[in-house]
Image: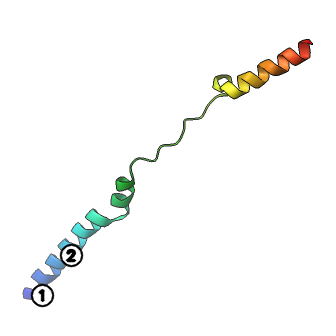
């Protein structure tokens, strides 16, 4: 009987440690992974500047 209680206690401790220090807890501690949202070409200022320069060059 004591072995069953020890096994249940060990499993409980193992599960609690896994919940506390598992892979999910490590990634949550790092914070959310934020990446820059994709920028469409018509919203990209560099693209618009280059497009304007090309248009002006073609006019000349």
* Neighbourhood count class around disc 1 (C-alpha, 10 Å): few under 14, some 14–19, many 20 upward: few
Marks 2 and 1, the one that precedes in the sequence: 1
Q: Position of residue 45 (x, y in %)?
A: 66, 25
- Label 2 sits on a secondary structure element that is helix
Residue wearing tag 1: 3
Taking the image as shown, residue 37 lies to the left or right of residue 16, namely right
**Relative vertical location of residue 47 with respect to residue 25 in this rendering, above or below:** above
**Relative vertical location of residue 28 with respect to residue 47 in this rendering, above or below:** below
- Identity of the residue drawn at 78% across and 18% down: 52
**Relative vertical location of residue 1 with respect to residue 58 in this rendering, above or below:** below
Residue wearing tag 2: 11
Image quadrant of residue 20?
Answer: bottom left
- Which quarter shows the C terminus? top right
Q: Pointers 2 and 1 in contact (CB under 8 A)? A: no
Image quadrant of residue 40?
Answer: top right
Q: CA distance from mark 2 to mark 1?
A: 12 Å
Q: Position of residue 53 (x, y in %)?
A: 81, 20
């Amino acid at each position: 009987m004591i072995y069953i209680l020890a096994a249940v206690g060990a499993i409980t401790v193992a599960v609690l440690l896994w919940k506390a220090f598992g892979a999910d807890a490590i990634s949550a501690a790092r914070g959310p992974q934020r990446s820059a949202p994709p920028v469409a070409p018509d919203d990209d200022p560099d693209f618009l500047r280059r497009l304007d320069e090309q248009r002006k060059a073609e006019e000349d």
